[in-house]
Image (cartoon, grey):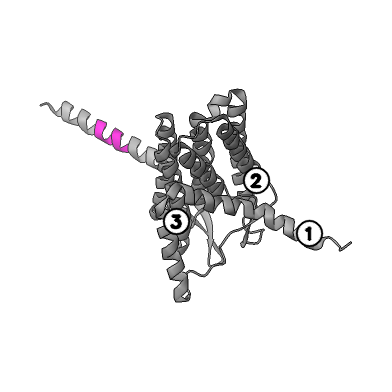
Amino acid sequence: MSQDSHKTEHEHAEHDEDVTATFLRETEVIEEAVEDGKKIRRRGIYLLPNLFTTSALFSGFFAVVAGINGDFSAAAIAIFIAMVLDGLDGRVARMTNTQSAFGAEYDSLADMISFGMAPALVSFTWILQDLGKVGWVVAFLYVACAALRLARFNVQIGSTDKRWFIGLPSPSAAALVAASVWTFHSFDANAFAFKLLMLVVVAASGVLMVSNIRYYSFKDVDLKGPVPFVVLLAIVLGFVVISVEPSVMLLLLFAAYVASGPVLAALRKMKKQPAS
């Protein structure tokens, strides 16, 4: 092999290295953060919490694919898995002190897929499409409300009481829709009445997400402090009851949570009204 050939190969290798280095620099994430009162520039992203977010995103995408393929039970279960993973990523970030603006934005985009698009598409492909234009309009309403809910939540971070959510949280709305699909599909409920019921569930979940109704967030619950033994016993019994008929019990659980907002709002309004 000639010296010119060696020189050409070396130049190609250097060019490839320069292209790779340029690509890495252009795709690098750089954030400005404040630590100990000082403004710093942080390069790169935290891996651990974003792995949970990516897993939640994958579960949401899998739910869409399973719904398209007609496996609605698997689609509903995938949405619940995404809900669990979504609850873990933020807690892991706080426990390991790896919060970042990138992680917050990535989490919102993942939530839009897992708790916005996935429940709407799964419910539409299962039964709402039988209602024609009304079915896809209601499915779109749910998606739009989920997007508005997430956008409003992002701009209200730090300005609201952490004990309460303003509007139904998108994971809870998705859980109600997923549990309804899972339960009704398991019992082969294809009557017109169930189609109307599913229509109401999806529409109500969407509207409640953008409402001003308060929902308890459970964020003030101290998971690190000691609790009575009966609390652990109640948790174990809860898992046992849910395992008997998971779809039905999860539907009842999240239906109760969704209903708690309007019920408590009505009670507060009644207390404020003067006696006749």
Dominant SS of magenta comes to helix
* Residue at the left extreme, as displayed: 1
Q: How far across and how far down the image is residue 26, in percent? A: 43, 40
Q: Number of numbered discs present? A: 3
The earlier-in-sequence mark between 3 and 2 is 3
Whether residue 147 can be seen here: no
Q: According to the image, label 2 marks what residue?
A: 208
Above or below residue 149? Residue 46 is below
Tell me which segment is drawn in magenta: 12-18
Q: What residue is at 40 percent from the left and 41 percent from the top?
A: 58
Whether residue 190 can be seen here: yes
Q: What residue is at 35 percent from the left and 40 percent from the top?
A: 21
Kind of residue at badge 1: Met
Kind of residue at badge 3: Leu
* Helix, strand or loop at mark 1: helix
Q: According to the image, label 3 marks what residue?
A: 88
Q: How far across and how far down the image is residue 235, in percent? A: 45, 65
Q: How far across and how far down the image is residue 142, in percent? A: 60, 37
Kind of residue at badge 2: Leu
Query: Is the residue under label 1 in contact with that under label 2 (CB below 8 Å)?
Result: no
Q: According to the image, label 1 marks what residue?
A: 270
In front: 113, or 158? 113
Q: Is residue 21 magenta?
A: no
Q: Is residue 17 magenta?
A: yes
Q: What residue is at 73 percent from the left and 55 percent from the top?
A: 266
- For marks 3 and 1, give the one nearer the viewer: 1
Q: How far across and how far down the image is residue 243, in percent? A: 40, 54
Q: Dot 3 surroundings within 10 Å: few (below 14), some, or many (20 or more)?
A: some
In the picture, which quadrant includes the C terminus? bottom right
